[in-house]
Image (cartoon, rainbow, N blue to C red):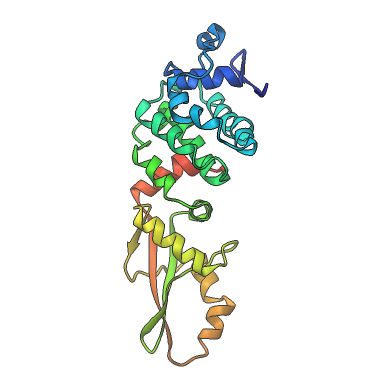
């Protein structure tokens, strides 16, 4: 077990205490909880969600859990002001831990689970954290997560046509995201999950990402063909998407 430690108030918390307090269902990481030690190794929830899988995990996965996942959660919790610290809802914590064991090797997904657990213990996010966030994270790829992180409020895409026949749907590129096929899949998935809302046929006049597409080499070459046309679509972050980003994406991806 690692000896990683985090300062909480005037008490130094080791990783074991953080895990135990987190999973014991007690009010998390208060000075009293820390000083009392609550050093019951891994409580039933941990054993039920992850513990019985550890023996079959590779050494690599075990180290990722101990060196990255748990410390990431602990570091975020340590930053929560005392007045905002609260007991996490088991309906959020339990499913999140259960799901996380299958994604421990995927950094972006692992980080979203970490953010969700920490947010569930911060009263600032009351009313924002949703049970559905666990299921949404499970259905995102690492690329989807990074792509969503790059979206501010909205994103422009186009259906590309030749002779009025669509040959490429949801064409979209952004700086650092030039693979339009992957981008199309990401947008489709985010829309399917309710993270993005589609505003049909609305084209934004002042939109730097739109200019990035229009001025790209791919579009410049296609424009040389007389039968080429573009049908714009604007996707905006839905209310669900806005809250999901606040809780699970933040500035960590």
Residue 253 seen:
no
Residue 24: x and y in percent read 45, 17
Residue 26 locus on image (x, y percent): 43, 16
Front in this rendered view, residue 80 or 67: 67
Q: Is residue 160 depicted above or below 135 in this figure?
A: below
Q: Residue furthest left?
A: 200
> Which quadrant of the figure contains the N terminus?
top right
Residue projecting furthest to the bottom: 226
Q: Is residue 119 visible?
A: yes
- Name which quarter of the figure residue 221 lies in: bottom right
Q: Quadrant of residue 132?
A: top left
- Name the residue: 55% across, 43% down: 251
> Which of 229 and 14 lies nearest the eye of the viewer?
14
Q: Is residue 71 left or right of residue 126?
A: right
Establish if 208 lies above or below 134: below
Count the marks.
Answer: 0
Residue ID at (50%, 14%): 30
Q: Residue 209, how many percent across, how many down? A: 51, 66
């Amino acid at each position: 077990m690692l000896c990683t430690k985090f300062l909480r108030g005037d008490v130094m918390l080791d990783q074991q205490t953080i895990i135990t307090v987190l999973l014991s269902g007690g009010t998390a990481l208060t000075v009293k909880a820390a000083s009392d030690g609550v050093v019951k190794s891994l409580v039933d929830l941990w054993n039920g969600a992850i513990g019985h899988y550890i023996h079959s995990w590779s050494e690599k996965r075990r180290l990722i859990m101990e060196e990255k996942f748990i410390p990431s959660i602990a570091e975020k919790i340590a930053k929560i002001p005392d007045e905002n610290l609260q007991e996490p809802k088991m309906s959020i914590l339990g499913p999140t831990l259960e799901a996380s064991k299958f994604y421990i090797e995927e950094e972006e997904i692992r980080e979203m689970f970490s953010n969700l657990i920490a947010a569930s213990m911060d009263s600032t996010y009351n009313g924002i954290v949703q049970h559905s966030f666990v299921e949404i994270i499970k259905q995102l790829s690492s690329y989807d997560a990074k792509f969503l992180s790059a979206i501010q409020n909205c994103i422009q895409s186009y259906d590309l046509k030749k002779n009025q026949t669509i040959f490429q749907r949801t064409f979209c590129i952004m700086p650092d995201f030039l693979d339009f096929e992957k981008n199309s899949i990401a947008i489709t998935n985010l829309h399917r999950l309710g993270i993005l809302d589609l505003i049909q046929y609305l084209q934004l006049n002042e939109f730097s990402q739109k200019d990035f597409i229009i001025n790209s080499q791919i579009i410049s070459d296609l424009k040389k063909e007389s039968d080429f046309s573009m049908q714009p679509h604007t996707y905006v972050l839905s209310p669900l998407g806005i809250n999901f980003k606040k809780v699970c994406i933040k500035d960590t991806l």
